[in-house]
Image (cartoon, rainbow, N blue to C red):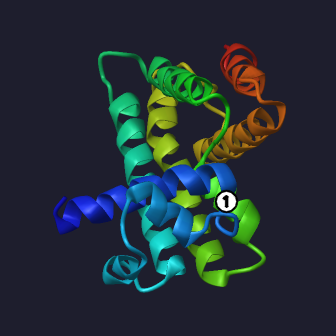
Amino acid sequence: MNKQETKQTLLQIGNQLMAQHGYNNTGLNEILEAASIPKGSFYYYFNSKEDFALQVLEQFFARIKAKRIEYLENETLDPLARLRAYYDWYAGYLEAAGCRFGCLMGTLGQELADQNEVFRARIDTLMMLSAEELVTCLSAAQQSGQINASLDMQELAAFCFNSWQGAMLRMKVTKTPAPLHTFIHILFDVILKQ
């Protein structure tokens, strides 16, 4: 493996382990062992475990943002169908992974918000950006008459994002996708139904 491939391997393994076990319960030795990389090499790529975890977080955000764009900007579907397709994809992905992990931002946010201000601030920013990405799709739905004109799209986007985070947490606790399906049903068949 070249240096870039090695770094990407470390980040991918870090994402998998932190998504399942959190920051504090993921050890560097565990990551290096899974990647078959000697311990001294880690500090060639990262300044510290915190630097590593922040890069894992950024990579996770970039991947999930690409998926949101893929679904929410798919103009072959009407706006609400795009949003539903995104949540259906995400629920299917989490279910296929055995309901073992949810959103890395949520996982690390719950664990580190009171312990590390750098993580808290960055996760808060990434979560706000994630919610903001829903606004455009929801606004298009509102403009096309699919959503009540009196609703505030910023508030609705924040509600969707926050509720989905809660559904993923419940999914991890119950080890079933039922909370995800409940969220999708209530959002589309009750809240947004005209």
Quadrant where the C terminus is found in the figure: top right
Residue at far right of view:
174
Residue at the image position 51 percent from the left and 43 percent from the top: 135
User: Can you give x and y, in whole percent of width and height, for residue 75 in the image?
Assistant: 30, 23
User: Can you give x and y, in whole percent of width and height, for residue 73 in the image?
Assistant: 34, 32
Direction from residue 83 to residue 11 in the image, left or right = left
Residue at the image position 50 percent from the left and 54 percent from the top: 15
30 relative to 50, above or below: above
Residue at the image position 49 percent from the left and 24 percent from the top: 89
Residue 124 appears in the picture as rendered: yes
Disc 1 designates what residue?
A: 22
166 relative to 117, above or below: above
User: Can you give x and y, in whole percent of width and height, for residue 41 in the image?
Assistant: 34, 78
Direction from residue 111 to residue 35 in the image, left or right = left
77 relative to 20, above or below: above
The answer to which of 105 and 148 lies nearer the viewer is 105
Q: Residues within 10 Å of mark 1 (few under 14, many from 20)?
A: many
User: Can you give x and y, in whole percent of width and height, for residue 134 in the image?
Assistant: 51, 41
Q: Count every numbered label the image shows and give the total.
A: 1
Residue at the image position 37 percent from the left and 16 percent from the top: 77
The answer to which of 1 and 61 lies nearer the viewer is 1
Q: Quadrant of residue 7?
A: bottom left
Q: Amino acid at mark 1?
A: Gly
Q: Quadrant of residue 186?
A: top right
Q: Secondary structure at mark 1?
A: loop
Q: Quadrant of residue 176?
A: top right
